[in-house]
Amino acid sequence: MSTPAAEHAPGLTSADGIAARARGLTKAYGSGETTVLALDSVDVDIARGRFTAVMGPSGSGKSTLMHCLAGLDTVSAGQVWLGDTEITGLKDRELTRLRRDRIGFMFQSFNLVPTLNARENITLPMDIAGRKPDEQWLDRVIDTLGLRDRLGHRPAQLSGGQQQRVACARALASRPELIFADEPTGNLDSRAGLEVLGFLREAVDSLQQTVVMVTHDPGAAAHSDLVLFLADGRIVDEMRQPTAESVLERMKRFDVIRAPSDDGGGDDGGDGPAGPATSGED
Amino acid sequence: MLKATLRSFLAHKGRLLLSALAVVLSVAFVAGSLIFSDTVSRTFDRLFASSSADVTVTPREDLESSVPTGAVRTVPASLAGRLAGVEGVAAAHPDVEVGNITVVDSENESVGPTTGAPTLAVDWHVTERSVVELTSGRAPRGAGEAVLDADTADTKGVEIGDTLSVQAQPGTFRVEVVGIATFTTTNPGAALVFLDPAVAATEVLGSADRATGISLTAGPGVSDEQLKRRVTAELGAGAYEVRTAGETAETAAEELGGFLDVIKYVMLGFAGIAVLVGVFLIVNTFSMLIAQRTRELGLLRALGADRRQVRRSVLTEAVLLGVVGSTLGLAAGIGLAFGLIRLMSAFGMNLKTTEMVVGWATPVTAYAVGVGVTFVAAYLPARRAAGVSPMAALAAADTAGTGRPLRARAVTGSVVGALGTASLVGCVLAGETASAASLLGLGVVLTLIATVIAGPLLVRPVIRVLGSAFPALFGSVGRMSQRNALRNPRRTGATASALMVGLALVGGMSVASASMSRSFDEQIDRTLGADFVIQNANFLPFSQEVTDRVRDTEGVGLVVRQRFAPVAVRLPDGERVETTAAGYDDRVDDVARVTYAAGDTAAALADGNISMDAGFAAEHGVRMGSTVPVEFPGGRSTELTVAALTDLEGGEGFGMQGGLVFGIATVEEYVPGGQDSALYVNAADGTGVDDLRDRLDAALDPYPQVQARDQADYKELVRDQIAVLLYLVYALLGLAIIIAVLGVVNTLALSVVERTREIGLLRAIGLSRRQLRRMIRLESVVIAVFGAVLGLALGLVWGLCIQQVLALQGMTALAIPWGTVVAVVVGSAVVGIAAALLPALRASRMNVLEAIAHE
């Protein structure tokens, strides 16, 4: 509920287990006068064994941050590490291998290969790598996600929620160092969304996985251990033990802060008075 | 609506490009063949028209034989004197022009064309009509001198002062080249040796009083037709052929026409294949474009466009494609004709590319073919587009649709397939060549259509089997490839169809030709008993000297000569059959194995006797001892007694209907001046076959036109003749494959676009670029191999049926060229890999993030 202590910058953690780290991470699009900074010298640590949510208004750079941390996108400046491996400067082939072996992904939609059944989708990263899945672990993941009786189904035969569960299982199956989930509940109704979030929580709590989730839904963010707030390419705040209400409150302040530059008035109908700037900012 | 159509056409120009290529190829072949044949006939019409004498008198043409005998028909040279007296004749010249000679240089290398065009000995008679002019040296004077045409001199490196040997029917003589003559018009490709008119007849015809024809020049004010009437009146009707310049040119052009028709039909065959395969490509492209644009079309419908407008919009796009393709194809056709003309020049026929003729029919045909084909091919997809419901605009975009159910195809395919199978069965059971052949044709067409229709139904079962090893070999990449190929059976089937058509054709033709080869092999094994056959590779007759030389060779035991004679026999059933008879020396039994139904070799070859095929005899009411009147060329005739009946299996091949055989003395008597066509040689006792071969090779060194062949060589020679047919089929296949590859590229490129998000996902979760490329390559390979397997299966069935038809012609052996079959399957896999190159590269270059975000 409380704003973070002022003594440390938002996004940085003092915990010893760091799953991923970025320093001076900058991502610019375009060149010359039309340059747009999607990420402006971001420093961030992702704590191991935790569920981190990244929030921010549209265009704040949250997806770009995830893509850069996951080795999907190249950076303009700065450095990114996954564990002890610096991934900035790696070649495509090494990045591909890194994604395959050390990172799990969940996307908003179109997570599964339509020609493969659920089980084949789950083991796909390991199949691609030519590795045998750890059957015990796989069984545990499948049971945790309640997919036992769906393994032979093709994606087209599964509901949206079931598809996301399969995607979640795939992300977990190779026991990656880090799981990135990009708006995993964006396309689901609230019940299925809650289910998926519950599984991600479960993955962290019982399976000791590390999850980074990008979302703009405060309710989804509330399932995390730590919320990082992004605005205009910078991490401007963080929140531990978030609740939906506190995150929503915090998000509303963005609207207010942005309101003057938005030619007056946020979409929220003008509620939420200009609160005092928190110590986390600047 | 037109604006929307144009926009859409331009938006999809990349995809349409491949279809346009198919149109371009077919139009190019159609236009190229038309331009080429127009150019050639115009050139030769001009040549013959300018070079023919006002009126020519030549020997009467009767009993044209398809098998050359080597005999030259002549008229008395004195006829020129007699005709000079006819009113209106300004000049009469006895011509000498013979083609039964061989000319060799001092190293015994032939200076004749290697293309099959003749070597001609001609008298040097310069008029304003001559097609050559002396460009260096001087005219030939007396025996032992000659002028050579410049093209031959160039290609064979003959210079003034060189000595050549001319092997003519009366005997070989040597000449010194004293001049070089250059063609002032198109050189039709022959080698020309000009001799002094004073000695030419003696040297090449054996008598000064002979000529191959008389050229007459009309006096002032006398028309060619008038002159012809007067000459005919003087000579009497029917004794000679009398032709005006126009008629001569026409006859010459007709003779050449046969050769040109071959080129024309070959080109049209290519065009046909290109059209046939191209249609699949176009249908497929339009179907895919429409599938991709379902939502867009639905929106158009929702906004108020009616079905007809949608259909018209698609067809307009097709017509635009056809027009663009035809225009490019026409241009490519001109290029193709240009190339062909240059190619003919390389073979010695010097056509001028500057005189290329593009008649009005060429562009008309080009556009008719190009636009017509595109329109027809796009019609079904257009109808389907018109059937898109306005609701489609609202429906969610499905990922890489699986197409509609295939029940209608199953029904139509089965019905057509059953009809086709019935025709093929009928063909196999038929006992008569003509009906078997037409049933075969019908069956081939119907089964092809059935396979094309039912192709998509076969995709699942066949590819399940073909790709079954993929998951084991290539893991999940292999599994995904196999399943991707199965995703849209309609599309996979249509893509593979293009390849299937070409390969079915090749499969059928290769079985047929392999069976023919084996049949001939077996026939040679069965019938040929000689140690060596001495023969021209073109089966043309050769001069008497060769025979003498062979007979004089040490170690030669027996020489049996073979000569051919054009004959007409009047049979007891009243029918007059024109055919070619063969004459042999006595001891045929020692060099060949002939099975007799009645009588024996001695009786057959005895003076005044004849033998024929037992089946032919029965058909025409001929019995042992029957007397049949036999006509020979030049009005000679006799009556021969049927003294033997043979049991020929392939009796009706090669224009040798009836299998007529008599003693060589009969040929010598009634076809004077003929040449031997083959010598069957056995080694003398105590002489090894290898020794004899060395000696024969040495003895025949001065005669490069003939070679000594043992059984194996002889089989090889026959096989080579059949192989020519096969090379043509392979060339057709090549073209079909090029177009089929375009189709596979097209399909894969589209699949890659459709699966952009899927590819992005796969890349994100760790599929490497190389694995991605392999996945697309494997899909391509499995599609190509599917086409190959279907095509070969169909082709093998056709081949079996063709063989059954051939069996009726005596070619009973069946051979399936498994080597070719395996090579084609492997080749199709390579084709698949090649077709996947660009789509795979494109897929692997995709930006992962953009791909994931792709809508």
Image (cartoon, helix red, strand yellow):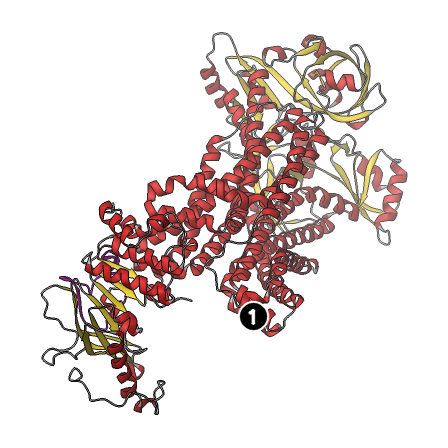
| Frontmost residue, A239 versus B380 | A239
In the rendered view, tell whether residue B107 sits above or below residue B405: above
What residue is rendered at 55% in x and 18% in y? B525
Left or right of A43 in this view: A265: right
Left or right of B756 in this view: B629: right
Residue topped by disc 1: B299
- Let me know if residue B562 appears in the view: yes
Q: Where is residue B236 in the image (x, y as percent from the top left)?
A: 89, 35
For disc 1, the neighbor class at 10 Å (few under 14, some 14 to 19, many from 20) is some
Q: Which residue is most to the right?
A: B233
Amino acid at pointer 1? Leu
Q: Magenta stretch?
A: A73-100
Quadrant placement of the C terminus of chain B? bottom left
Quadrant placement of the N terminus of chain B? bottom right
In the rendered view, tell whether residue B282 sits above or below residue B610: below
Question: Does dot 1 land on a helix, a strand or a loop?
Answer: helix
Magenta includes B843?
Answer: no
Given the image, what chain letter belongs to the residue carrying mark 1? B
In the rendered view, tell whether residue B660 sits above or below residue A26: above
Magenta includes A99?
Answer: yes
Q: Position of residue B453 (x, y in %)?
A: 60, 46
Q: Residue B67's quadrant in the figure? A: top right
